[in-house]
Image (tube, grey):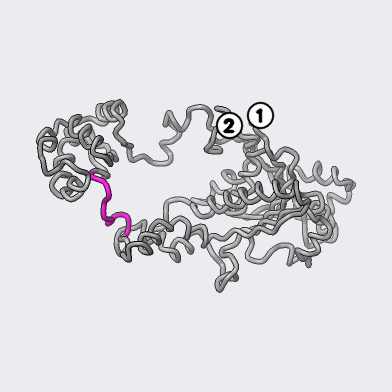
């Protein structure tokens, strides 16, 4: 279901998106959440992402919310003509293919800029310009290349992060750049060519580890084997067998945690008065925290920690978020799916004037908006049918 929002800064902005998987579609989704009309151009057989199974089954419905779908056969003259007119009508064009679909159609950036001087081209690529610019890339590829996987897994076992973090964050940088380019265009009347790189996005995610080496000359070990900067920053088991992360990162939190867990011996130990002392003594203090926490029920600890400002968290699974009171507070958008069913999925993680409502969240059926969009450009019904292609 689409719920009207008072915050639609991109109302009236038309975005043409030719992309698949997660990177490009994320960029379009963020723009749609902000009120833009995002028209996803699909081939007659539909975006291949629609047909993924397993872990990929969620990709299309998650990252194509709030968009329209237009089917065009770009091997036909009618399809190419309709696509060209769509581009002339657009404010933004997004693609995330290794080779730009414009090139395949014999369209150069210069030609597009001649017919539409204000268009903003967003190329979601594996790399920015440089020695690797023509390589293929995936989220997992750049996580391995930049050291993100090295820092995530235990020593000798690099692991990708458990989400498409570079694809999603890269899409967000694309949308961020579009916002800036649209603002600039109000002053210059000219568009921009934006290129977003997965590799460079992942570099930013490991920047803190790079800079630690730059400043101190010491390579940080993987996060599971890191040198701790906090006295307590660990996962513990409670009496009812639940896993709980607990943190105490200041002397005040140390005193509070020790008091709540009745560890008076640690409070009385004069060798544990500063954070530096407490970090140095982790080998002997952590077993005491583990034992004390193992004697208490999760709900009991949760209430005590929340009341006294101790950082804590259950070690949860994504599926459990549908029952989490914070995740479902306010509104978890409900999106209509092709075929009549619906799904719940997290929305934009911001509030505007205490409101969290996105402009639109429904998932389009393949080609659902072809007739409406192309008719608005002046094409006849017969032309539209030919532009769609027989396979549609």
Q: Position of residue 254 (x, y in %)?
A: 22, 37
Could you tell me which secondary element the residue under label 1 belongs to? Answer: loop
Q: Position of residue 280 (x, y in %)?
A: 18, 50
Which residue is nearer to you in this view: 77 or 133?
A: 133
Q: Are marks 2 and 1 in contact (CB under 8 Å)?
A: yes
Q: Is residue 224 left or right of residue 188?
A: left
Q: Which mark is residue 352?
A: 2
Q: Residue at x 55, y 54 (%)?
A: 170
Could you tell me which secondary element the residue under label 2 belongs to? Answer: loop
Q: Is residue 111 above or below residue 312?
A: below
Quarter of the picture holding the N terminus: top right
| Residue 345 visible in the picture | no
Q: Residue at x 77, y 60 (%)?
A: 74
Q: Is residue 342 left or right of residue 149?
A: right
Q: Residue at x 27, y 37 (%)?
A: 242
First in sequence: mark 2 vs mark 1: 1
> In the rendered picture of this protein, how many numbered marks are placed on residues?
2
Q: Which residue is under mark 1?
A: 6
Q: Residue at x 64, y 48 (%)?
A: 28
Chain part drawn in magenta: 222-231
Which residue is nearer to you in this view: 123 or 103?
A: 123
| Residue 74 visible in the picture | yes
Which secondary structure dominates the residues rendered in magenta?
loop
């Amino acid at each position: 279901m689409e719920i009207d929002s008072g915050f639609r800064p991109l109302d009236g902005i038309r975005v043409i998106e030719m992309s698949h998987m997660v990177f490009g579609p994320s960029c379009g989704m963020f723009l749609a959440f902000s009120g833009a009309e995002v028209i996803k151009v699909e081939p007659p057989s539909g975006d291949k992402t629609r047909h993924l199974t397993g872990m990929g089954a969620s990709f299309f419905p998650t990252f194509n919310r709030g968009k329209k779908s237009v089917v065009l056969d770009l091997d036909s003259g009618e399809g190419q003509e309709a696509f060209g007119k769509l581009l002339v009508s657009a404010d933004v064009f997004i693609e995330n293919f290794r080779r730009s679909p414009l090139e395949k159609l014999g369209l150069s950036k210069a030609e597009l800029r001649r017919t539409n001087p204000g268009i903003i081209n967003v190329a979601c690529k594996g790399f920015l310009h440089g020695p690797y610019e023509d390589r293929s890339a995936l989220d997992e590829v750049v996580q391995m290349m930049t050291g993100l996987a090295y820092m995530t897994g235990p020593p000798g076992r690099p692991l990708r992060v458990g989400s498409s973090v570079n694809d999603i964050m890269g899409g967000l940088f694309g949308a961020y750049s579009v916002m800036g380019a649209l603002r600039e265009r109000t002053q210059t009347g000219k568009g921009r060519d934006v290129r977003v790189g997965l590799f460079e996005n992942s570099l930013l995610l490991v920047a803190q580890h790079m800079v630690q080496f730059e400043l101190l000359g010491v390579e940080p070990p993987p996060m599971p084997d890191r040198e701790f900067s906090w006295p307590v920053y660990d996962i513990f088991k409670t009496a009812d067998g639940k896993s709980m992360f607990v943190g105490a990162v200041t002397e005040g939190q140390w005193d509070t945690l020790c008091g709540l867990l009745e560890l008076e011996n640690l409070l009385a130990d004069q060798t544990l008065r500063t954070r530096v002392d407490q970090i140095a003594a982790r080998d002997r203090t952590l077993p005491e925290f583990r034992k004390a926490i193992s004697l208490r029920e999760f709900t009991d600890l949760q209430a005590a920690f929340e009341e006294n400002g101790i950082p804590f968290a259950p070690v949860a699974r994504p599926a459990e978020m549908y029952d989490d009171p914070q995740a479902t507070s306010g509104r978890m958008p409900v999106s209509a799916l092709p075929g009549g069913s619906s799904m719940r999925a997290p929305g934009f993680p911001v509030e505007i004037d205490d409101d969290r409502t996105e402009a639109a969240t429904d998932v389009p059926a393949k080609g659902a908006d072809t007739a409406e969009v192309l008719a608005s450009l002046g094409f006849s019904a017969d032309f539209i049918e030919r532009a769609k292609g027989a396979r549609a």
